[in-house]
Amino acid sequence: MTDEVLTATQSLVAYINAHYDGYIDSTNHEKSFNESMKASHRNSIKSGTVYLKVTGNGSVQFFVDKVTGDILKAASWNAPAKGVRGNVLSGINGLEAFNDTGIGLLQVRYLK
């Protein structure tokens, strides 16, 4: 794994987490509820043999190829779906791979 891919993935995950936090902070709920929602949707990175696995909210959000930086949608807990959605080394740090759900969550888009 290259340090560049890991650093870019960490940056992408930090952006995704901040995006959701910003949405939650803009709601009119009690602060304790907002903090609970933020904690439950916090994404983290786990390193596997071939991929970095980004998990959050009890499921795999996406995989990142440790060599190329390609972003892949999760097919299951242990395997990505076929078809590259984006790359963490792109000019926009892989955001081309995501759709905004409208409720603050960014999810990996389906292939057309």
Image: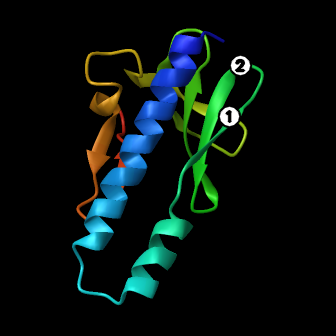
Residue at x 44%, y 21% (from the top left corner): 84
Answer above or below: position of 52 versus 87.
Answer: below
Q: Identify the mark nearer the N-term, 2 or 1.
A: 2
Q: What x and y, as percent, mark residue 55?
A: 60, 48
Q: Is residue 64 left or right of residue 112?
A: right
State how many labels appear: 2
User: Which residue is painted at 35% across and 27% down in the image?
Assistant: 94
Q: Which residue is mark 2?
A: 50
Q: Quadrant of the image for the C terminus?
A: top left
Q: Which mark is residue 52?
A: none
Residue carrying label 1: 79
Mark 2: give few (<14), some (14-19) or many (20+) Cα within 10 Å. Answer: few
Label 2: element kind:
loop
Using the image, determine if residue 17 lies above or below residue 26. Answer: above
Is residue 55 visible in the rendered structure shown here? yes
**Left or right of 9 on screen, residue 22:** left
Which quadrant holds the N terminus? top right
Front residue of 88/11: it is 11
User: Does the rendering let one see residue 71?
Assistant: no
Residue nearest the observer in this picture, 39 or 97: 39
Between the residue at mark 2 and the residue at mark 1, the CA separation in whole angstroms equals 10 Å
Q: Amino acid at mark 1?
A: Ala
Q: Is residue 69 above or below residue 52?
A: above
> What residue is drawn where x is 73% and y is 38%?
78
**Occupied quadrant, residue 92:** top left
Q: Nearer the viewer, mark 2 or mark 1?
A: 2
Which quarter of the figure has residue 15? top left
Residue ranking furthest to the bottom: 30
Disc 2 residue type (three-letter) = Val
* Image x and y of residue 59, in percent: 62, 55
Within 10 angstroms of label 1, few (less than 14), some, or many (20 or more) residues? some
